Image: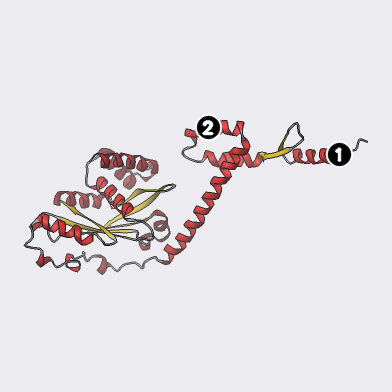
Amino acid sequence: MAILSPCSIQLRLMLKKNIFVNIKSCNRRTIMTTRPKLEKVLKNLQRNPFYDKYANKIAKLQQTSPEEFLERVESQEKKFQKKKEKQDEERKFFESQAKPCLSQEKQSQPAQLNSIMKVDMIQDKTRDEIINIWKDYHKDKDCICGILAPEQFYKMFERGKCYSTFLLPLPRKHGYEFIVSQFFGLEIHMTALLWYQAHKENAPECLTITHYTELKDSKGIILMRGEFDKKYINVQEAQCLVNELQLYYSTDNPKRLQLLEIFTNKPDEFKHMDLIAQLETIQLELKNN
């Protein structure tokens, strides 16, 4: 009976375990990967919505340099794991911040402009002067502000009665996060979809938009104020959400109206990627304005 060398035994064991070994002329060996692991990686990649776009490049790298292919995938998995751990920490924090359900009496009371500034002291000011005062007042505060014309305001809140809840995509460093927006009275409340799924109406808010109508008849303006959670979004992200909201609810773009209709009345036909496509269109519109 032939006696196998230790190297031969090791090689056969590796082959039985489905491990591919690259034997070079200098007898140095480099373990590339196991077939099950490679198949698992490919299966996970194929779930990615952008897989088809890069399928050819992935296949080429897999064939020419499988080691590099797996290294890249494993590097991305580590980044994803770190991101997930960070999200878990944020989730625990925001769950601790979940607010109690508001009483119906408190919910029905509209915000008063007098709680921010004395209305009687600006009544003799012109429309433009009040706009400048409003903007200057909020310049160094952790909130955003704006001015709406009556017709813009009416259209937004009439549409808000038909489509009281909607999703808005928020660009993040590694993709998009979906934010739930909900109309209630003269306010619009926004929260991360993740928190809304966990807490419903008690979810912690990342942005609350309030409208003040006291000067609507006398000056022809509605004052808007958006208070946001600095731990979750910054001022640019808050402004981005407000811009998206107004373009969906205050303009007559057919595609956006269709998305509002589908989300509300035909949820089975709703596709999240359609929102992202519209966001790219919105960004182009804002650049051109």
Task: Verify CB contact (< 8 Å) between mark 1 and mark 2.
Answer: no
Instruction: Looking at the picture, tell me which residue is in the foreground, 251 or 19.
Output: 19
Query: Residues under labels 1 and 2: Cα distance?
Result: 41 Å
Q: Position of residue 241 (x, y in %)?
A: 31, 51
Residue at 22% of width from left, 47% of height from top?
250
The tally of labels here is: 2
Residue indicated by mark 2: 57
Q: For residue 271, what is the image quadrant?
A: top left
Colour mode of the rendering: secondary structure
Q: Position of residue 267 (x, y in %)?
A: 37, 45
Give the amino acid type for the residue marked by disc 2 in the picture: Lys
Mark 1 or mark 2, which has the lower sequence index? 1
Position of 153 with respect to 236 (left or right) is: left
Looking at the picture, does residue 274 appear above or below residue 131? above
For the residue labelled by badge 1, is the local secondary structure a helix, a strand or a loop?
Answer: loop
Give the amino acid type for the residue marked by disc 1 in the picture: Ser
For the residue labelled by badge 2, is the local secondary structure a helix, a strand or a loop?
Answer: helix
Near mark 1 (Cα within 10 A), the count class, few <14, some 14-19 or many ≥20, is few
Position of 213 with respect to 256 (left or right) is: left
Residue at 55% of width from left, 50% of height from top?
78
Residue at 39% of width from left, 41% of height from top?
273
Quadrant where the image shows the C terminus: top left
Q: Position of residue 276 (x, y in %)?
A: 36, 42
Instruction: Looking at the picture, tell me which residue is in the foreground, 234 or 24.
Output: 24
Residue at 39% of width from left, 54% of height from top?
193
| Extreme-front residue of the structure | 26
Position of 233 with respect to 1 (left or right) is: left
Looking at the picture, does residue 102 appear above or below residue 166? below
Instruction: Looking at the picture, tell me which residue is in the foreground, 277 or 198.
Output: 277
Q: Position of residue 73 (x, y in %)?
A: 56, 42
Quadrant where the image shows the N terminus: top right
Residue indicated by mark 1: 5
